[in-house]
Image: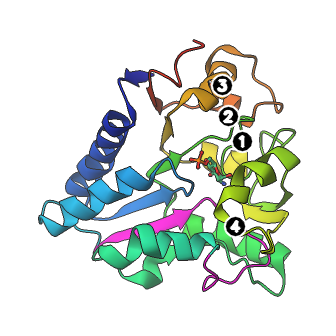
């Protein structure tokens, strides 16, 4: 657990882990996350790419999750978010970027297909995570199976309310998602979880000091061999 002063320091520390990975390996498989927390980390990766310090030309990415019912062209989709926040500003071949297909005709088959794509890429080297206030990772809401794989998941009211800020008042907000499972995340060789702000303090306490329980999906990370929580003082306040 790395506790830093503020969100800027968290982003810089987290970005550095990805920068080192990209500099060290000729081909990296990166697991990426959405939400507001990783935005400044992505900004730093864009800057490092523009400065010529890193290249994504040999990188493959897999995002954690997507809203079910939204095509990747929809402004609220996570595919669109990733294009805006990262993919359109780096030298990645966009065919090597993967986000679960929210518009799949057969979502269950698409989930299995996503698992196969991760496996075919050789597994994820580093998985980036944020955390929901209820301890969710990806869209693995409380009660998610700790060995779960990529699947369709219903969102809790708490998560729908938390994410309502991204949607217009009269806009359709999906209640279903496709998300990597907790088992999928646990298979990543390394996990980097970022959390900032006082509203994450209870989730971080449950993740680190609470029991291993599906009631706090992030607590599964207690069993991971190589996981770092990079958090600011506000998020660490209840530890
Ligand atoms: C969404 C995403 C999660 C993310 C969470 C927290 O629910 N599916 O991957 O960790 O939001 O978002 P934020 O970083 O905006 O607090």
Disc 1 crowd rating (10 Å Cα; few below 14, some 14-19, many 20+) is many
> Which mark is first along the chain, 2 or 1?
1
Spatial distance from mark 2 to mark 4, Cα to Cα? 26 Å
**At x 66% / y 44%, what residue is drawn?**
137
The local secondary structure at tag 4 comes to loop
Q: Position of residue 20 (x, y in %)?
A: 24, 47
Residue tagged by mark 4? Answer: 167
Mark 1 vs 2: CB contact within 8 A: yes
Name the disc covering residue 207, or none: 3
- Marks counted in the figure total 4
How far apart marks 3 and 4 lie (CA) works out to 28 Å
Q: Position of residue 216 (x, y in %)?
A: 76, 31
Residue at mark 1: C-beta within 8 A of ligand 1: yes
Check the image and name the residue furthest to the left.
Answer: 52
Q: CA distance from mark 3 to mark 2?
A: 5 Å
Quadrant assignment, res 29: bottom left
The numbered dot on residue 136 is: 1
Q: Identify the residue position indicated by label 2 in the image.
A: 218
The kind of secondary structure element at disc 1 is: loop
Q: Earlier in the sequence, mark 4 or mark 1?
A: 1
Residue 60 bears which disc, if any? none
- The percent coordinates of residue 106 (x first, y second) are 84, 83
Q: Quadrant of the C terminus?
A: top right
Q: Which residues are magenta?
A: 57-75
Q: Earlier in the sequence, mark 3 or mark 1?
A: 1
* Image position of 147 with respect to 32: above or below: above
């Amino acid at each position: 657990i790395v506790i830093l002063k503020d969100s800027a320091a968290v982003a810089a520390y987290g970005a550095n882990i990805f920068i080192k990975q990209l500099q060290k390996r000729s081909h990296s498989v990166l697991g990426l996350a959405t939400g507001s927390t990783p935005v400044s980390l992505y900004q730093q990766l864009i800057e490092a790419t523009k400065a010529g310090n890193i290249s994504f030309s040999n990188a493959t990415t897999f995002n954690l999750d997507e809203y079910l019912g939204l095509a990747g062209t929809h402004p609220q989709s996570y595919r669109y978010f990733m294009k805006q926040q990262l993919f359109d500003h780096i030298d990645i071949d966009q065919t090597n970027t993967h986000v679960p297909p929210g518009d799949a005709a057969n979502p269950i088959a698409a989930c299995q297909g996503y698992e196969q794509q991760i496996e075919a890429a050789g597994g994820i080297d580093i998985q980036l995570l944020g955390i929901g206030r209820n301890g969710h990772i990806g869209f693995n809401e409380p009660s998610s199976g700790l060995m779960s794989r990529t699947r369709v998941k219903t969102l809790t009211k708490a998560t729908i309310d938390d994410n309502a800020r991204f949607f217009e008042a009269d806009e359709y907000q999906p209640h279903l998602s496709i998300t990597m499972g907790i088992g999928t995340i646990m298979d990543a060789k390394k996990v980097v979880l970022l959390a900032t702000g006082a509203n994450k303090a209870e989730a971080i306490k449950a993740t680190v000091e609470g029991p291993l329980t599906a009631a706090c999906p992030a607590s599964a990370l207690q069993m991971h061999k190589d996981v770092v929580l990079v958090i600011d003082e506000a998020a660490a306040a209840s530890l």
